[in-house]
Amino acid sequence: KPSKSGGFGLVLGNSYLRLVALLLVLLNIVNTTGEFILARLVTAQAAQLAAADPDFDRGAFIGAFYGGYFFWVNVASVVLQAFLVSRIVTRFGFRGALFALPVLALGAYGFAALGAGLALMRVIKTAENSVDYSVMNTAKQMLWLPTTREQKFKAKQAIDTFFVTEGTAYCDLAEELMRGVWRKYWIPDWGLVDRVASSAGAGDMGLLAAPQAAFRAGCEAVEVLERLARLTGSDEYR
């Protein structure tokens, strides 16, 4: 019997749907944090090159970087979707597909928290986004398989609009906070490493706060996924 609850009522009244909404918010925060880190590294690299060469075109450098970056993200996404997604789901099941991105992000940002340059951060973000657009996108749709018809039509709309939008708003707030940290600790004249090292020695992690924030959000996403896996119950999703 259809309920009289709207999409938000269905989400808030069901523990499984609440976890789905929380998962999407956490993944949004992780991805946006990574994009912020990459953008700051690109602009810092461009500023250093421009300081060394007055004729250096900063805008062309940034445009060429992002052109190549998005090209390889798209290529990797197509390859993963065409050749690996179905095999991952067949071999590891629903849980394997659902855990792929959070586990990747957890390991990548945990490594980045130790210090990552532009080249390494580009590889991390290329891998993260390509898995997000292929494996995780498929897993997100699979999350709705054990739900009712009403939940698919009403609750999914609420989650895809409001909760994802709210996640973006939280990311914008986090980005402003991280930008303040970046301005405080990034000094182009003599670089980043010494300042971070001295700050860390004083108990202040400085610029490491950004990848650590992504790392913590990744840990929370994994915890959410574990609870989702338990709630599905059926062997079909194991």
Image (cartoon, helix red, strand yellow):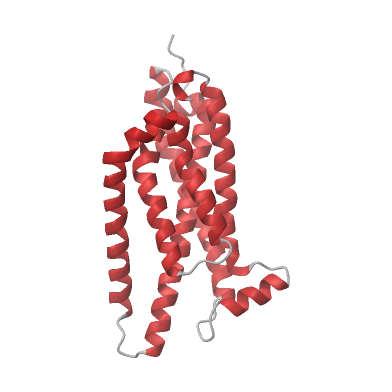
Residue 225: x and y, percent?
53, 35
Q: Nearer the viewer, residue 194 or 42?
A: 194
Q: Nearer the viewer, residue 61 or 11?
A: 61
Q: Of all residues shown, which one is farthest toward the top?
A: 1
Residue 83 vs residue 124: left or right?
left
Residue 177: x and y, percent?
56, 62
Q: Residue at position x 46%, y 15% from top?
A: 3
Q: Of all residues shown, which one is farthest toward the front?
A: 91
Q: Residue 122's quadrant in the figure?
A: bottom left
Residue 193: x and y, percent?
57, 76
- In the rendered view, tell whether residue 188 sits above or below residue 136: below
Residue 131: x and y, percent?
38, 46
Q: Work out which quarter of the rendered image holds the N terminus and state it.
A: top left
Question: Is residue 126 visible to us here?
Answer: yes
- In the rendered view, tell whether residue 8 sits above or below residue 188: above
Q: Nearer the viewer, residue 196 or 83?
A: 83
- In the rendered view, tell whether residue 66 sits above or below residue 54: above
Residue 80 vs residue 190: left or right?
left
Q: Nearer the viewer, residue 38 or 131?
A: 131
Question: Is residue 13 visible to us here?
Answer: no
Q: Residue at position x 37%, y 56% from top?
A: 126
Q: Residue 160's quadrant in the figure?
A: top left
Q: Residue at position x 53%, y 61% from top?
A: 112
Number of disc labels: 0
